[in-house]
Image: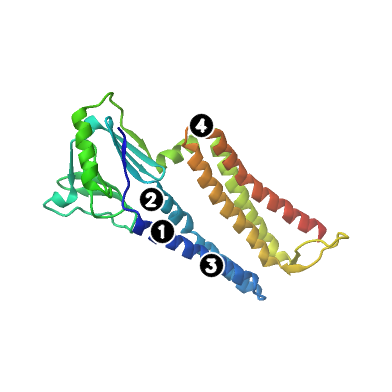
Amino acid sequence: MNQVFRPIRSRGIAVHLGALLLNLAAVGFLVILAFSQSVQGFFILYLVASVLIFIPVPFFAYRLFALLRASYSVFREGISIQWGVRTEEIPMQDIEWVRLADDLVFDLPLPKFIVQGAVLGLREHRDLGLIEFISSSTHPLVLVATPERIFAISPADPAGFMDALYRNMEMGSIEQIQPKSSRVDLLVGSLFRDKIARNLILLGSFLSIGLLIAVSFIIPTRDTIPLGFNPIGQTAETSPSERLLLLPVLSLLMLFIDLGLGSYLYRKAGYRMAAYFAFASTLIMPVSFLGLIATILIFQ
């Protein structure tokens, strides 16, 4: 019987969701400020600031996703640890011992950078060896020892987790499973070994960067750009040329979103074609914006 235990999540969700919403609100506020500026230099300043503030957004979004998806499963063949796109399957025959961290006579060395809801990382202990933290908090911690390393996990019900593990050990495995590890670095390696995925990702990235380079060369050559056409085909309202920077910013934003969606679908069985479509969609926005810029240059 497969029993699923969740980590303590409420505080971690509040921290990561709060940070994510705060960053997005700051980005939106700076973009609005940028469009309200009449001085060209301030427009660029606010837009660059919005890009810098947006950089941590994918980090917080993934950490929140990982925490919401996190689980520790116990079954007769072993233990499965799920944390975001990270999956660890530990065969029952590889488990050497299990105990609470509070039962140790010394304190565990914690990862150097931890936040509520994401206690992740590797530490070396002179007596225990390599310890990998895949937990949401520093207390309570359950230590699961294997020949290669010790996993420090944080089920919300540690006593129930250990009881389920001991009962499944007593029943014995129906069939032995092999250790399985699926990590982000392995996913990246798989993507770049796949010719179709690699080419789509690289082409989408080069087009978005090319759009940024093209805009940076166009802006100094003109003071204003048209924002549209009137019913008879003449250019209507104009705007400072620095606002063209919004196009590569939006293109890079969609690039991050499409890469994240494609990577998530790529690792799921049966969704390989959907992942290719997600990677292919990284080409749509930069190509469309390059066509828009070409139209502006031709008809202005």
> Front-most of 16 and 8?
8
* Circle 4: element type: loop
* Residue type, label 1: His
Residue 111 picture location, percent across and down: 28, 54
Residue at mark 2: 67
Position above or below: 170 against 55: above
- The image quadrant that residue 246 belongs to is bottom right
**Residue occupying the point 64% across, 62% down:** 245
Q: Is residue 28 left or right of residue 146?
A: right
Q: Can see residue 60?
A: yes
Residue at mark 1: 16
Q: Which mark is residue 270?
A: 4
Q: Which mark is residue 133?
A: none
The reply to whether dot 1 and dot 3 touch (C-beta < 8 Å) is no
Residue 173 picture location, percent across and down: 25, 26
* Residue type, label 2: Leu
**Residue occupying the point 18% across, 30% down:** 170
Residue at mark 3: 49
